[in-house]
Image (cartoon, grey):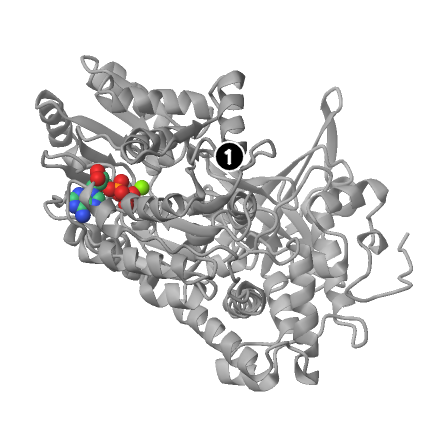
Amino acid sequence: MRKSLLQTGKDTKIEGFYGVGAKRAEAFHKMGIFTAEDMVYHFPRAYEPRGNIKTTADAEDGEICSLILTVATEPKNAMIRKGMTLTKFSAFDADGTCNLIYFNQPYIKDAAHKGMTFRFFGKVKRERTGVSMTSPVMESVNGTIPLRDYVPIYSLTAGITQKLMGSVVRESLQAVQSETDGIKEFLPEEMRKRLGICGIKDALRMIHMPRVMEETNIAVRRLAFDELYLFALSMGLYGKDEKTKCNSSYPNTDRHRFLSSLSYALTGAQTRTFDAIEADMTSGYRMNRLVVGDVGSGKTVCAAYAVYLALINGKQAAMMAPTEILARQHYGELSVFFGAMGYRTGLLVGSMTAAAKRKVIASLADGTTDFVIGTHALIEDAVTFTDLGLAVIDEQHRFGAGQRSLLAKKGENTHVLTMSATPIPRTLAMAVYCDTDVSIIDEMPPGRQKVDTFLVNESYRARLNAFIRKNIEAGGQVYIVCPAVEEEETLVSESGEAFPESDLLMLGAQTEDKPKKKAAVDFAKLLSEEIFPEYRSNFVHGKLNGKEKDRIMSEFAAGNIDILVSTTVIEVGVNVPRATLMIVENAETFGLSALHQLRGRVGRGTRKSYCILVSDSRSQKARERLKILCETNDGFRIAEKDLEMRGPGDFLEQTYGKTRQSGEFDLGIASLERDVKLLYTAFDEAKRTLVEDPELSSEKNKALARVLMEKLRRNGGGAF
Ligand code: ADP
Ligand code: MG
């Protein structure tokens, strides 16, 4: 029985909708859906093309489409096994007949009768014996609800079916339309007109119930703008915390002594970064600086200079790296460097014995250790400092915002220096880092060799294998990267049938071909057992635990492995000077920036190094994208191109880390929007809004302020 809705508005509880009892409500809650508003912001993943109408004559075998059929024979139920019924009947259109088969849906018998006409949507099977469909979605063509051409498919959770989700979404859409308690437009009409974006209620209707697919693009544009604009506003409002005055000043800056203990001269970009760090740390205000530079551009020495400034001013310093192996690598170099100056450096990583950890922790607490390098272990509660003056975070995008700030919180007015190897286009950096000062290292140390890069297809396989052999014989090591082992996600339709993504109209999908991905596991096996049995090969992938990964990486670094097959886990890197060849399989599935990062793993020694991108993609666009890598080694140029071609979504994710992590801003739909200009527009608009009304306190911005507060509250307090 239909529940009577006492209150219909955006805050209507999910329990208030048809078919949602306590148990199902709990399942919705698990997905973060509590109210009608939550529900309408749960966007479809894809759409079933039910308007793709074919006939029994022209539907191809395996095609996903609709047939409009009139029932010819009364459905018959048969018990084929205990607890399993089979319902069968036939139906016809002007061109022929089709057999319909349903499992465990005995009620079909009561719904379909001779002479009734339905639209059947599903996969058509064409055999010599005739045309059939198994478990298609059956909709009456004379029903009260008009048939839709595009039916959304949502990601689900146990206990919720596509049908239930669909009906709750439709009811929620109605509820949020309410004039009084519904979702209110929060962008001024003037702005929407100027930018050509639709109203919020229209956007929500179009994304859930598009009449034509173009409507989903219009909706995505509006909803993506909202995410980016609110994100920019929140950074403008809260990120720009007033420069924090430091109690302690850093009067000493003996740069000369530091430089004279280096074995090389700084590049111009490094010198500029030194200047900036020095200015920050002596300014009497807290430093919050990000150093961005390609792999191998020499960021560590900049961090070391910041550490040096802290130490010579009587402070402690800490450096956090995302992996144990990276922490150890830093420790190996820096403990010697600072040891020679009379400072004591400690290491704190997960795999150390409890006793060894305790010793380091005690020495940090009593101040006998000046500088500590470690992993996440550093942010555990047990770790305290006498006087932490500087927190350095390497490969910052590997950490969540919360983790990043935890380290700095272990001191008072601690300076913060973060490092990122994800080159970010200057324009984007200016837009997104309102609260952080950025130093860009866009110059490589001299003598750094260019990694020659080639794009090849499968027809080169034999030559490629010969090339691998040649490299190993010459004393080199080889990386082979395959895309992650994930299987193609299938989405479950209303009828319970699972469809692969490739058969559906994906929200925000690009029309590129999708060559089959090499499953890394099988490929690794093939390489090691059949193609290169004489070499030592190993395999690292995401499902290995951290220790095992680190162990294999260390083996590779030590030269005990010739060929390392991996998924992208090798991205954060270890220095392996003997690695001279990087092969990337299914290169088209990676972003340019990611490929550039991968390429940075080779060419770290004196030997000539190569990167081979293997791709069978026939998409012109994909090949053009990959060719950029063959033309340049400049990460910043590649980043610009990547941004141009793929939009800002990936960047924001790389820059801010895992955006879905709690406490961070969810740029879910914005990553579907490929229009970079929209990002800049959103940031420009945010600045314009804040210049006019810095606190968002005017009447005009009331709805906006409410939405922003609400979003910040949901995201855990507004710390980005
Ligand atoms: P990344 O920016 O990837 O962290 P590193 O700081 O690890 O790069 O530097 C890579 C290598 O380059 C190191 O071995 C470092 O000693 C060396 N290096 C850094 N700066 C210079 C320079 N100006 N001249 C020569 N070698 C340098
Ligand atoms: Mg580094």
Taking the spot 32% from the left edge, 31% from the top edge, the residue there is 335
Instruction: Determine whether 541 is above or below 65 in the image.
Output: above
619 is higher (above) or lower (below) than 610: below
* Image point (26%, 19%), residue name: 537
Dot 1 falls on a residue whose secondary structure is helix
410 relative to 389 in the view: left or right: right
> In the rendered image, which quarter is residue 535 located in?
top left
Please tell me which residue lies in front, 505 or 95: 505
Image coordinates of residue 102 in percent, x first then y, are 66, 36
Residue 192 percent coordinates (x, y): 55, 81
The quadrant of the rendering that contains the C terminus is bottom right
Residue sitting at x 45%, y 34%? 486
Mark 1 residue crowding within 10 angstroms, few (<14) / some (14–19) / many (20+): many
**Residue 318 at x, y percent in the picture:** 44, 40
| Image quadrant assignment for residue 569 | top left
Three-letter amino acid code of the residue under disc 1: Leu
Q: Is residue 569 visible?
A: yes
Residue 564 % position (x, y)? 27, 25
Mark 1 highlights which residue? 378
**Is 3 displayed left or right of 244 in the figure?**
right
